[in-house]
Image (cartoon, rainbow, N blue to C red):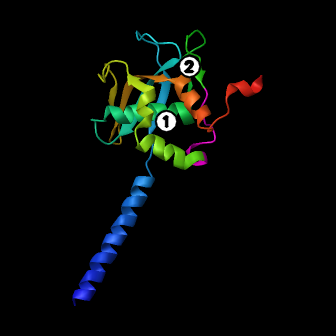
Amino acid sequence: MKRILFSLVFLLSLGWTAYAGNKVDKKEYLYEIESFEGNVPAQQGYCIIKVWNYGRREKITTNSCMENAVHGIIFKGYAGLGKTASDKGKKALVPEGYEAHKAYFDNFFNSGQYLQYVQLTNKGELLAGDVIKMRKGGYKIGMVVMVNYDALRKRLENDKIIKGLDFLF
């Protein structure tokens, strides 16, 4: 009887571990990014963007906004607001996607290394109109952040994820 009970507990814990491992591995990034034209002074090499996060709850942590901003700069890129805007947008640094260097980016995002390249512009305060309740439930929340584009690009070049621009010359 004890042997059967022990086996059952062991199998259930093994099944839970496998389920939890799959759940963590399938993180979804639901967001949009766009250039931001506002009263935020930009430093050389930085880009100022607005990140729109989608979630079920209104309270979205600032870390998820910052993670999505860096994720977007690396894999999606963003367009400028218009022809006269000072920020013309940026192309994705790694257009082939997350899966091309999965182990590297899993470590990069899970360890919090991405936080070296992003900062909040207004101490995490939301602007008027930055919390939108969606019709089908859930929220769309916008936050303005600055990403150190040049330093992020340099790191990816040094780690041999992307080619440096010096190969052209």
Numbered-mark total:
2
Taken as a whole, is the magenta stretch helix, strand or loop?
loop
Q: Position of residue 79 (x, y in %)?
A: 57, 23
Q: Amino acid at mark 1?
A: His
**Disc 1 target residue:** 71
Residue 132 location (% of width, % of height): 33, 30
- In the image, what residue type sits under mark 2? Gly
Tell me the quarter of the picture where residue 168 sits: top right
Q: Can you tell which of label 1 and label 2 is closer to the viewer?
A: 1
Q: Using residue 68 as the reference point, say whether residue 162 is left or right of it.
A: right
Q: In the image, is residue 34 above or below residue 76?
A: above
Quarter location, residue 123: top left
Which residue is identified by label 2? 80
User: Left or right of 21: which side holds 91?
Assistant: right
**Residue lying at 26% horizontally and 87% vertically, measured from the top left:** 3
Give the side of residue 152 with respect to residue 123, left or right.
right
Mark 1 crowd level (few <14, some 14–19, many ≥20, 10 Å Cα): many
Q: Secondary structure at mark 1?
A: helix
* Residue positioned 33% across, 31% down in the render: 62
In the rendered image, residue 56, in percent from the top left (x then y), is placed at 32, 42
* Residue range of the region highlighted in magenta in the rendering: 91-100
